Image (cartoon, rainbow, N blue to C red):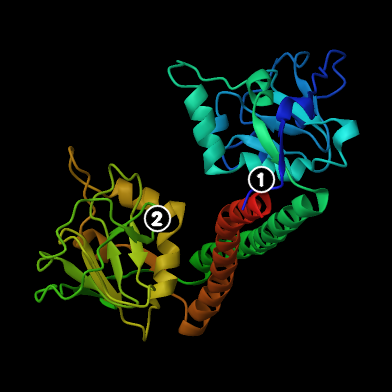
Amino acid sequence: MESKVKWVRLGDYISPRNERNSDFRYGVELIEGVNSDGEFQPTKAITDGIDLKPYKAVWPGDIVYNPSRLNIGSLAYRESGMCIVSHLYQVFHVKEEFKNELLPEFLLIWFKRDEFSRIVDYYNYGSQRAEFNLKKLGELIIPLPSLSEQQKVVNAWKAFREIKEQNEAKAAPLMQLCQSYIQELKHKYPAQEIGPYINRIDERNTNNKIKEVRSVSVSKEFNETNAKVDKNNLSGYKIVRENQISFVQTTGNEKCLCAAINHLGFPIVVTSVNEVFETDERYLLADYLHMVFRRKETDRYARFHSWGSARETFTWEDMKRFTIPLPPLDVQRAIVNIYMCANEAKQIAAEADRLSREVCPALLQHVIHS
C-alpha cells in the first residue's frame, strides 16, 4: 500500500538562528554544549578571558547541533530557558508559519534515527573534518504526516524520556547516600582485612556445560565478551555462580579494580586468569563488599598496591589484605537495600532510554507508511 504522507524539503520549513552575543548581554554561566547523547550540558572548556561576542543565543524551540559531531548524535532540542553556544554550532528553528504543520520534537526524533547518522556519514565521506552544515541539512527530504500523527510519536518519546529522567533523578541522590554512609562507617568501625571473610573459588567448567562467557568491565559489571571464544572448549574456564565475585588481576590497562558480582540469575564462566571468590555472609555481605569496590578510593588503592612494570598486577593475596569498615549485618543490609533501590531506578531509566530509541523510530515508520 502506497503511503499517503507527503515528503517535503526540510529547508523550506526551518530557519537558522544567528543571534550573536555582540553586546555581551549573556555571561559565561550561560555557555552550554551538546553531548553525544543529545543533551545540553555546561561547557567543560576554560572560560577565563574567553571572547563571548561570537557566541550564539539558543531559545526554547530551537534545535542545536555540532556540525562536526552530528553523526554521533550531538544534536539537541531546547525545551526551556535560554543558553549560548559556540559560534561553531548550528542553530535553527521551525518557521513560525509552519508550526502548525511540523513539530520540532518530531523533527528531533527523525534526526535521532540510525538512518540519519548514516546519511550524515555518507555526505561527509572523505572529509578530514566532517561538517554537515545547515545548507546541506536543508536539502534533505523529510516526511510530513498530519500534526496529530506527529503528536502520537512525540507523546511516546516524551513518556519514555519522562520515565528516564524521573528515575535518574531518584537514583543519583540514593547512590550518593550509599557512598556517604560507607564513608561515615570508616569513623565508626575499625578497618579490617577482608581475608578472613572471603573464600577463594576455583571451580572449573570441566564438562564444558556452561556456555555463558563473560568479561568484567571497568563499570564493575559482567559483560558479553568481545574476545573470540571457542564455546566448545571452555573446560579451563572458571565458573562464577550467583552472588560470587570475580575480579581481574591486572589494573594497568583498566586504571581501576575490575570486579563484578553475579546477579544474572544463571552461572557464567570467566577466563582462568580471573580470580573468583565468595564472602562469608555471616559477617560480610557480597553486595556490601561490591559497593565498596565501586568507590574511586578502591580503584586508587588497587592501583597503588599493584606490582610489576609491563602489567600491573593485583593478586589474590593483595585482595586478602584489602581493608574495609565492617559494620553489623543489619547496617550492611540497610546500605545494600538503598543501593538496590538506586540501581533499580538506574535500570528502569536505561530501559526507558533503550525503548525510546527503538520504539519511537518504529512508531515513526508506522506513521509514515500507514
Q: Residue 318 in the image: x percent, y percent?
A: 24, 59
Choose between 176 and 356: the one closer to the eye: 356
Q: Crowding at label 2, few (<14), some or many (≥20) Cα neighbours within 10 Å?
A: some
Q: Residue furthest bottom?
A: 282
Q: Residue 293 in the image: x percent, y percent?
A: 40, 61
Residue at (65, 63) in percent of width and height: 167
The answer to whether residue 341 is left or right of residue 107 is left
The CA span between labels 2 and 1 is 41 Å
- The quadrant of the rendering that contains the C terminus is bottom right
Residue 340 seen in render: yes
Q: Crowding at label 1, few (<14), some or many (≥20) Cα neighbours within 10 Å?
A: some
Q: Residue 90 in the image: x percent, y percent?
A: 69, 24
Q: Assess whether mark 1 and mark 2 are in contact (beta carbons under 8 angstroms).
A: no
The three-letter amino acid code for the residue at tag 2 is Thr
Choose between 36 and 300: the one closer to the eye: 36
Q: Which mark is residue 298?
A: 2
Residue 42 seen in render: no
Relative vertical location of residue 132 with respect to residue 233 in this rendering, above or below: above
